[in-house]
Amino acid sequence: MAVTPPRPQGPQQNLTLLHTGRGLELGWVVSPGSPPGGRGALTSHGFGVRMFAKMGSATIAFRTSLVALAFSSWGCSGALAADTTQQLTAVPDPSRFGRIGEKLAEWHVVAGGGALIQPEYEGSDKFKVTPVPFVSATLFDTLTIDPTGATLAVFERDAFEISARLGYELGRQEDDSDHLRGMGDIDFGATIGAKAAVELGPVELFAQLDKTIGGSEGLVGRVGLEVTQPVSERLILGASASAVVADENHMQAYFGVSAEQATRSGLKRFDAGAGLKRADFSLSATYSINQNWIVRGEAQLGVLVGDAADSPVVMEKLQPAAMLLVGYKF
């Protein structure tokens, strides 16, 4: 992928709120005749919020996914034509932060935090609140590092993109819930995967596959779509839907009950096979307070299906979750 020069300086540049097929972008828009900017995208397990800091040809993407964060906590592998621009304010000068600020501008860092409410484990009928701190750093429009791992854009042509990703699977602890006592722990594992996505106006269609090394040793795939729509110059609404499939290793680790586990836990023995695991639906709202601050809220409903829904480990098939985040772009 070609790397074009950094953002040119000048009074004709303006920070704008951009709506694209990828979601919300905070971008630098310059007068006609300036070099066109590129576009970068942080892909993640699942889908969720993207906060972009776009400087000239280097597009920096930050994406914290409700599904990704929830799935990371549950030990599962997860994972947005034409721009509509609205002028907000003048370009901030990165030098106002000194040498550190200039280095951050090269990497396009977004930092923030929030809270996530979700089931205690995937299939639980009880909830927990988890703090969500994050720092996302993207180099040009190619490499992004965020709390869910590292993403590398390996191919991009027109509306089509392929990316590779390294991440992790936290696993599951039997003391996460009284219902899991006797089930033993599922160890931490690293994940390696790939994602293909195509943009059709405000709609993104995607398919991704992640392999866990260690932990469940599972293979998880997700297919879905995401739609975003601006309703004002500061507010963008979004909706998404996806389906998750998993191999036997993953399903047995999280939803199966072996003979030994049945003896220790008192749960009925159960063999979970490969297949469709769950469907996820979400609604989101992203509000740009000013040129630096962004607030994001998202609500999701997951529905366990197949062997996942029938597992004695599962107390509730419907898995709601909600997240609120505040981010600052340096």
Image: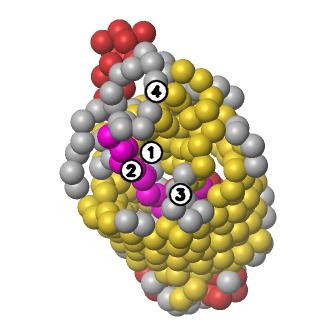
CB atoms at circles 1 and 2 under 8 Å apart? yes
Q: Nearer the viewer, mark 2 or mark 3?
A: 3
Q: Which residue is mark 3?
A: 82
Q: Earlier in the sequence, mark 1 or mark 4?
A: 4
Kindly state the secondary structure of the residue where label 4 is placed: loop
Q: Which residue is mark 1?
A: 61
Look at label 1 and name its amino acid: Ala
The residues bearing labels 2 and 4 have C-alpha atoms spaced at a distance of 20 Å
Q: Nearer the viewer, mark 2 or mark 4?
A: 4
Kindly state the secondary structure of the residue where label 1 is placed: strand
Kindly state the secondary structure of the residue where label 2 is placed: loop
The residues bearing labels 4 and 3 have C-alpha atoms spaced at a distance of 19 Å
Q: Which residue is mark 2?
A: 40
- Identify the residue at image location x=44%, y=33%: 31
Residue 89 vs 243, above or below: the answer is: above
Q: Which residue is mark 4?
A: 13
Whether residue 265 is visible here, answered yes or no, is no
The residues bearing labels 3 and 1 have C-alpha atoms spaced at a distance of 18 Å
Residue 256 lies, in percent from the top left, at 56, 81
Look at label 2 and name its amino acid: Gly
The residues bearing labels 1 and 4 have C-alpha atoms spaced at a distance of 20 Å
Q: Earlier in the sequence, mark 4 or mark 3?
A: 4
Residue 27 vs 252, above or below: the answer is: above
In the rendered structure, which segment of residues is drawn in magenta? 35-49
